[in-house]
Amino acid sequence: MRHFLLAILFLAYNSPAQKSTLPIIPQPNEVSIKDGSFTVSPETKIVLRHSESFKADIDWFNDYLEKNYGFRLEFIQSESKMGNFIQFEYPDFEGGFKENYHLDINKARIKITAEGNGSGAFYALQTLVQLLPPQQIKSLKVAPTKKFEVQCCYIEDRPRYQWRGMHLDVCRHFFPVSFIKRYIDLIAAYKMNVFHWHLTEDQGWRIEIKKYPKLTSIGAWRSGTMVGSYKDKKYDTIRYGGFYTQDEIKDVIVYATARHITVVPEIEMPGHSLAAVAAYPWLSCSGKPQEVAKGWGVFDDVYCTKDSTFQFLEDVLTEVIALFPGKYIHIGGDECPKTRWKTCPHCQTLIKKEKLKDEHELQSYFITRIEKFLNSKGKQIIGWDEILEGGLAPNAAVMSWRGTEGGIAAAKQKHNVVMSPGKPCYFDHYQSKNKLTEPLAIGGFNPLDSVYNYNPSPKILNEQETQFIMGAQGNVWTEYILNEKQVEYMAVPRMIALAEVLWTLPENKNFTNFVLRLNKNKFILDMWQVNYAKHFITKIK
């Protein structure tokens, strides 16, 4: 182990990709260290001359300072002649770069340059937060000082991809609003900008729909849960469930928006819908009573393709649209068995009426019909790569999870793509080869370095096709993730590695240097008492 740590140190300090060992993650795309430091104290002022454009981000920064360092900074209208201020400026570069920022720190002032209606100022402040001296954070029970130094440096930074996402399944296991906000804070801290909220499944319906109250009174609760490994087929008999009210969801949206996070809801269809069918059996082909699933897997009872089902889904989506302001609604589309459709008189009649080839084209018809409805409401659909089967809906974006083939096919058809292949983007997989020392997981092996070395843009795509790769995301499915601490353990630091993949240009990346910065950056995780996995955390100081 000692030789391994020495090798990391040597490579990190001597790599051509090495730009700095400042504790900044993601690695800025242009950074230079300057002599000296800027002194932050309660006497430091914030200069906000132009407008209120940056005030929400500054309020977030002041809240952070107050919580962790014990003071806030005062606003003034013009620079102090004596120096020691933080000022915000509009950029000289042309508009349209809403996530770009410049951060210039010298001994007299900190200057942040960003577009007033973008995310750049917030990301600059996140970078500044990582430069604050962690050993003085009062939550670490060290006597706080009212004066500390920040390294002088100059940074010009911008993201590589527009979709930098993290997913969380709250259906297999449910998590309260307080944890959803904590998860969003973790995402935002590393300049990720999408939270994919998986809200409906066979094992539970988690979003209040006022027109259909049984979705939560019945569909949000199951009579037991699978215990241990899937192959053991063991279940407890404890009633389990929960859901988010619409007011709670609105609260989460406001919280996320303040951190420049877009929340993308997932309402699964036509498969993985057993919780809805349990609430309203007429949604299925058979109409027979069902129970919310206790175990994991794929179930044959899915939404039937009759008009009453589409009316139900349009009603549900109308309420979802009113809650979520983002462009995309995720409609699932994965793992839909065609068993019931093959014997359903209505589904077979519809296949003949629409001159469809088979049940795969019936699924395409289903997805296209939902897409037309969402497009009419100003929204776009995104779905798992199975929505390619039978023909891709005209405006659909594809989330590629079964490898990269689906994403490649969609990009070649000029559809937007989010890469999320099981290897290495499924963070419910093991992160160590020694499974005996790890909590039970669904399988697979996705260590930190494989996440870090992932490139979301396949080389097989030409330059034009590559433009359709919006980015990537990490997925956290919770069949085997029972509580909040375990979510953090499985997601962090792999989420942090993916954040650098999605922000930093490949030529500026270096894994050994990343590990060095992660060791310096871990004090922020300690401050938040994050239960992160420590496989690559060393005693380097």
Image: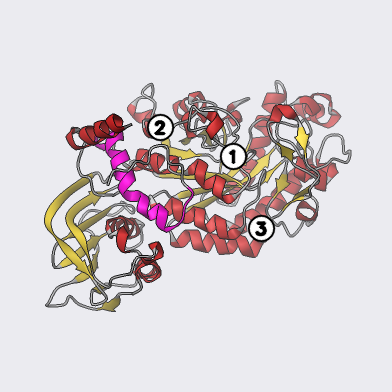
Residue depth check, mark 1 versus mark 3: number of the one nearer the observer:
1
Residue occupying the point 57% across, 37% down: 439
| Residue topped by disc 2 | 456
Q: Can residue 447 be seen by looking at this rendering? A: yes
Q: Is residue 63 left or right of residue 134?
A: right
Label 2 is placed on what type of residue?
A: Pro
Asked which secondary structure carries label 2, the reply is loop
Range covered by the magenta-colored residues: 506-531
Label 3 is placed on what type of residue?
A: Tyr
Residue occupying the point 60% across, 32% down: 442
Mark before the other along the chain sequence, 3 or 2? 3
Q: Is residue 305 left or right of residue 116?
A: right
Asked which secondary structure carries label 3, the reply is loop
Cα distance between the residues tagged 3 and 2? 33 Å
Label 1 is placed on what type of residue?
A: Trp
Residue occupying the point 19% across, 47% down: 31
Task: Give residue 158's position: percent from left, percent from top.
Answer: 29, 47
Residue depth check, mark 3 versus mark 2: number of the one nearer the observer:
3
Verify CB contact (< 8 Å) between mark 2 and mark 1. Answer: no
Q: Could you classify mark 3 by the number of other residues whose Cα lies within 10 Å: few (under 14), some (14-19), or many (20 or more)?
A: many
**Colour pattern:** secondary structure
Mark before the other along the chain sequence, 1 or 3? 3
